[in-house]
């Protein structure tokens, strides 16, 4: 594993300056970024996924573990990240680490200001991890990372205006215009999942009621299935039998699997989630007018069972329908791994600067060794 600890330790302020300037040069910089392997980390409400990614977006190795319980200290999650990176570094020459965090990341891409599904509150994640790892670290919102990956390597290639929607435990979102992620003044743009769509509706972990993600997400899907099963509804007999009466075992992937097998209730639940998704993206089209919506995250594995109803609802609720061009609604090509791939690729942008700095440091050391050798030679000849 390449070591940067000695070099990076005394220049924390300069590192922050470098990261602040990365966003303004992303489109140009990704073409000249070093073609070196980097690690991407995708942290969600239920899982932490880590992978070594090459310069073409190929995953060389991937590890996955459950997210530590959110009631535990942030250090527990940081420990998990460090363990995964060190494990991968045993088998790969890692040059940088990118973190895609499910939460609000500040404009400097250092602190996680708030994470609804984790115990991070104004957490200096980048600095803490950089102090424990021997490579540069970049932190960004997980949906921003996923949008970058889809624009670089997936369904968003060739698009100038793209909106990414990630359906997982909740809903994440990102805006990409002209090859640049739009993070907003304070770094928290794209939190579409917390738009209020039902005043006084279901309580959201963010503290409000009626957020969009309470009606179109993995949590919403599982909640509806469990409520029907707990009520002993006749339409839920199939899934009740599948879990042998243990309602707590009902999960999103299970619902998707049963829907593919023809379970009527599971198909209907995915249609409901898809319809809410379509309503939300119609609202986003009215505000942002993108050329393409890319739907990613774990729930998108349901494919046309989800995205078909979403397209129908989008067309039905789109403002000015019939008199305006319609954005494409497509499934992410990189699937649930998009956030990990994007975080790794964004980290490659800062790896170049640290590689240059390390090279200068090595060159200085070599010049010093030559000078010292020249000083020793005359004395040794006496």
Image (cartoon, rainbow, N blue to C red):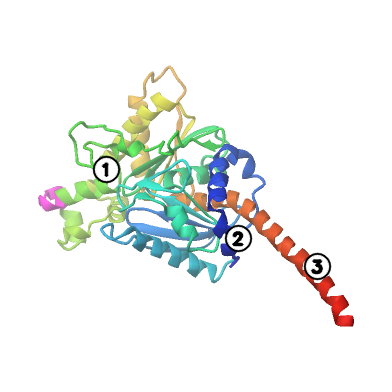
* Mark 3 or mark 1: whose residue is earlier in sequence: 1
Could you tell me which secondary element the residue under label 3 belongs to?
Answer: helix
* Mark 1 or mark 2: whose residue is earlier in sequence: 2
Local crowd size for mark 2, using a 10 Å CA cut-off: few (<14), some (14–19), many (≥20): some
Task: Answer with the quarter of the image where residue 3 lies.
Answer: bottom right
Residue under label 3? 371
From the top left corner, tell me how far across and down residue 227 is, in percent. Answer: 15, 49
Q: Nearer the viewer, mark 3 or mark 2?
A: 3
Residue in view at x 55 percent, y 34 percent: 159
Q: Which quadrant of the figure contains the N terminus?
A: bottom right
Give 69 or 354, whichever is nearer the viewer.
Answer: 354
Residue in view at x 10 percent, y 50 percent: 231
Which range is magenta? 228-236
From the top left corner, tell me how far across and down residue 77 is, in percent. Answer: 36, 60
Relative placement, left or right, of 225 versus 283 is left
Q: Residue furthest left?
A: 231
> Which mark is drawn over residue 131?
none
Task: Answer with the quarter of the image where residue 36 lies.
Answer: bottom right
* Mark 3 or mark 2: whose residue is earlier in sequence: 2
Picture layout, residue 85 above or below residue 287: below
Local crowd size for mark 1, using a 10 Å CA cut-off: few (<14), some (14–19), many (≥20): few
Residue under label 1? 206
> Which mark is drawn over residue 7?
2
The alpha-carbon separation of the residues under discs 1 and 2 comes to 39 Å
From the top left corner, tell me how far across and down residue 247 is, in percent. Answer: 17, 58
Picture layout, residue 304 above or below residue 125: above
The alpha-carbon separation of the residues under discs 3 and 1 comes to 61 Å
Instruction: Give the dominant element type of the magenta stretch: helix, strand or loop.
Output: helix
From the top left corner, tell me how far across and down residue 216 is, in percent. Answer: 29, 41
């Amino acid at each position: 594993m390449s070591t940067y600890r000695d070099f990076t330790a005394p220049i924390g302020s300069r590192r922050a300056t470098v990261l602040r300037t990365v966003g303004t040069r992303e489109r140009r910089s990704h073409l000249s970024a070093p073609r070196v392997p980097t690690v991407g980390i995708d942290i969600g409400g239920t899982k932490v996924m880590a992978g070594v990614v090459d310069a073409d977006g190929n995953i060389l190795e991937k590890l996955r573990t459950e997210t530590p319980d959110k009631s535990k200290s942030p250090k527990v999650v940081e420990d998990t990240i460090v363990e995964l990176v060190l494990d991968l570094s045993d088998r790969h020459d890692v040059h940088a680490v990118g973190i895609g965090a499910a939460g609000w990341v500040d404009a400097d891409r250092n602190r996680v200001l708030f994470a609804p599904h984790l115990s991070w509150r104004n957490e200096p994640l980048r600095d803490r991890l950089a102090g424990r790892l021997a490579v540069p670290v970049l932190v960004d919102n997980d949906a921003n990372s996923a949008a970058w990956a889809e624009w670089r390597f997936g369904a968003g290639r060739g698009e100038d205006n793209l909106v990414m929607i990630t359906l997982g435990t909740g809903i994440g979102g990102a805006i990409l215009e002209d090859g640049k992620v739009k993070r907003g003044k304070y770094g928290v743009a794209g939190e579409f999942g917390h738009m209020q769509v039902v005043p006084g509706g279901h309580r959201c972990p963010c503290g409000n009621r009626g957020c969009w993600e309470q009606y179109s997400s993995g949590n919403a899907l599982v909640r509806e299935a469990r409520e029907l099963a707990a009520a002993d509804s006749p339409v839920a007999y199939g899934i009740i039998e599948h879990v042998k009466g243990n309602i707590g075992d009902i999960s999103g992937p299970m619902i998707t699997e049963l829907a593919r097998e023809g379970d009527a209730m599971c198909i209907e639940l995915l249609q409901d989630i898809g319809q809410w998704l379509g309503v939300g993206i119609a609202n986003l089209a009215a505000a942002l007018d993108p050329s393409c919506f890319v739907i990613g995250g774990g729930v998108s594995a349901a494919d046309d069972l989800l995205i078909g109803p979403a397209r129908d609802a989008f067309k039905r609720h789109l403002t000015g329908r019939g008199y305006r061009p319609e954005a494409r609604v497509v499934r992410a090509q990189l699937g649930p791994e998009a956030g990990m791939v994007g975080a790794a690729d964004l980290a490659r942008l800062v790896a170049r600067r640290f590689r240059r700095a390390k090279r200068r440091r090595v060159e200085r050391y070599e010049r010093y060794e030559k000078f010292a050798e020249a000083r020793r030679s005359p004395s040794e000849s006496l």
